[in-house]
Image (spheres, grey):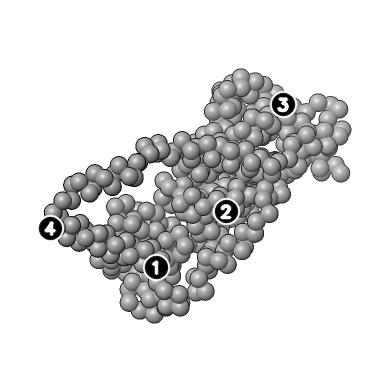
């Protein structure tokens, strides 16, 4: 994970608030932080910021491909958390709730950038992402081509891949984050993978040759 | 959707390790008998590697960004504060008070009112301080703190919830308070029996009473 934003010790917080017989588990730690933020506790906000802001930034950057926009989205999300902590009811985990806010903010930013706005049916160019002959001879360049192809996927396809592999979210959690049925998430993943299939096959063949 | 298609749709999350135990077992059984699925899994792992690989041109998160977050939070908090009250003129107020309280009976009433205010203030301060240092925590269910039993939940109650409300909730859930309140007014409840599913059910039941419960989440071991 990226370096923390502040030099506060999360473990120290847990020791302060956990009871001897009921130590605060990881998910409860974030719940406690949100409850404290709801009361205006700035130290708890700093702890939550240190954990989540780098992840939100990475997610936003990979979706928007613009550093200053991604930074703006990150602080938009963290401000939303400050304002909305009172309304957190524990219907989902804190991480799912925070990434739901991040997704909403990020998609709004993506929609403001026509360069990366690609609707679900409009990404046909990615389907032609067959590796170039030069790239096939060079594993690193294949990886770069695959990264470039990922960036050309629609926002809806990219977010499913990022949340699955980078953030380790289950399809159920992604469905909660994206406010859509679980089968929609599975279908988006299927189509995203289909668009990347030629490059993925080439990466595997290249790996088998080495 | 055929069984194979269903398994195929789960493969990305099998590669990521986020399926539940039943789904994982079903995928592994299918993988053992299908080279096609194994090839697809290899492709997904290659995709995962690319997603996880650091990108040379990708900027790092700048920790100093938090300063900007604080500026925006402070601006937001300033907006939320109520408008400054009009400056009072204390001497003019005293003169009005003196003019209005002209009879001894009115002074007695005023003195009684002052005593009531002082007692109310003392009570509020004592309640806000919570139990005295060194006093032992005793559970709402009346027993000693439990160390074994069913699953636990972290719960915050509404400030308006009464002790009778909480007792009724605990009886309904067959649960007891085993820790709390924390500095954030959170309690740890423990069901007397059950597992993760019962904890989810209890959390849902608690959330269904928003007039008493601010939030409730099962604690994962």
| Mark 4 vs mark 1, CA separation in Å | 38 Å
Q: Which residue is mark 1?
A: B130
On the image, the x and y values in percent for residue B19 come to 55, 52
Contact, CB < 8 Å: mark 4 with mark 1? no
Chain of residue at mark 1? B
**Vertical relation: A65 (above or below) B26:** above
Residue shown at 49% from the left, 74% from the top:
A21
Q: Position of residue A201 (x, y in %)?
A: 73, 36
Q: Nearer the viewer, residue B174 or B142?
A: B142
Of labels 2 and 3, the one closer to you: 2
Disc with the residue nearer the chain's start (4 vs 1) = 4
Whether residue A153 is visible to the viewer of this picture, yes or no, is yes
Badge 1 marks a residue whose secondary structure is loop
Q: Dot 2 corresponds to which residue? A: A43
Q: How many tags in the picture?
A: 4
Q: Residue at x 29, y 56 (%)?
A: B160
Q: Sequence order check: which comes first, mark 2 or mark 3?
A: 2
Q: Nearer the viewer, residue A91 or A74?
A: A74
Chain letter belonging to callout 3 = A
Residue under pointer 3:
A129
Task: Indicate the position of residue A24 as horizontal and vertical percent values.
Answer: 52, 65
Mark 1 vs mark 3: same chain?
Answer: no
Quick check: do tags 2 and 3 share a chain?
Answer: yes
Task: Identify the residue at horizontal 64%, vertical 33% (top origin).
Answer: A70
The answer to whether marks 2 and 4 sit on the same chain is no
* Neighbours of disc 3 within 10 Å: few (<14), some (14-19), many (20+): some
Name the element at disc 2: helix
Q: Residue at x 29, y 52 (%)?
A: B211
Q: CA distance from mark 2 to mark 3?
A: 47 Å
Residue A192 visible, this angle: no
Question: Disc 1 to disc 2, how far (Cα)?
Answer: 22 Å
């Amino acid at each position: 994970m990226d370096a923390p934003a502040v030099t506060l010790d999360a473990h120290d917080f847990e020791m302060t608030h956990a009871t001897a017989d009921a130590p605060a588990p990881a998910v409860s730690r974030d719940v406690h932080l949100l409850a404290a933020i709801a009361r205006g506790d700035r130290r708890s906000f700093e702890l939550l910021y240190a954990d989540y802001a780098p992840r939100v930034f990475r997610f936003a950057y990979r979706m928007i491909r613009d550093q200053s926009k991604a930074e703006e989205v990150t602080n938009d999300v963290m401000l939303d958390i400050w304002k909305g902590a009172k309304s957190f009811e524990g219907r989902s985990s804190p991480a799912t709730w925070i990434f739901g806010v991040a997704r909403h903010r990020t998609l709004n930013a993506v929609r403001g950038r026509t360069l990366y706005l690609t609707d679900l049916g409009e990404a046909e160019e990615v389907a032609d992402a067959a590796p170039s002959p030069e790239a096939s001879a060079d594993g690193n360049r294949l990886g770069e081509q695959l990264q470039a192809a990922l960036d050309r996927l629609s926002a809806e396809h990219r977010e499913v891949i990022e949340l699955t592999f980078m953030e380790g979210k289950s399809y159920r959690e992604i469905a909660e984050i994206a406010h859509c049925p679980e089968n929609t998430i599975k279908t988006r993943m299927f189509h995203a993978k289909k668009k990347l299939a030629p490059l993925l096959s080439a990466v595997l063949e290249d790996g088998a040759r080495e | 959707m055929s069984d194979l298609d269903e398994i195929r749709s789960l493969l990305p999350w099998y590669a990521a390790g986020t399926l539940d135990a039943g789904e994982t077992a079903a995928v592994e059984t299918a993988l053992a008998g299908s080279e096609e699925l194994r090839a697809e899994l290899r492709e997904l792992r290659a995709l995962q590697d690319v997603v996880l690989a650091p990108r040379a041109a990708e900027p790092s998160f700048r920790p100093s960004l938090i300063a900007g977050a604080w500026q925006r939070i402070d601006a937001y908090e300033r907006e939320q504060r109520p408008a400054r009250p009009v400056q009072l003129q204390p001497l003019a107020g005293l003169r009005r008070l003196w003019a209005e309280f002209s009879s001894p009976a009115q002074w007695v009433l005023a003195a009684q009112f002052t005593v009531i205010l002082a007692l109310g203030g003392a009570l509020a301060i004592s309640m806000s301080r919570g139990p005295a240092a060194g006093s032992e925590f005793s559970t709402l269910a009346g027993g000693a703190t439990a160390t074994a039993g069913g699953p636990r939940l972290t719960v915050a109650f509404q400030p308006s919830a009464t002790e009778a409300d909480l007792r009724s909730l605990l009886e309904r859930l067959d649960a007891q308070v085993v820790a709390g309140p924390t500095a954030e007014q959170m309690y740890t409840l423990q069901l007397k029996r059950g597992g993760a599913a019962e904890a989810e059910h209890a959390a849902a039941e608690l959330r269904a009473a928003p007039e008493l419960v601010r939030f409730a989440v099962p604690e994962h071991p």
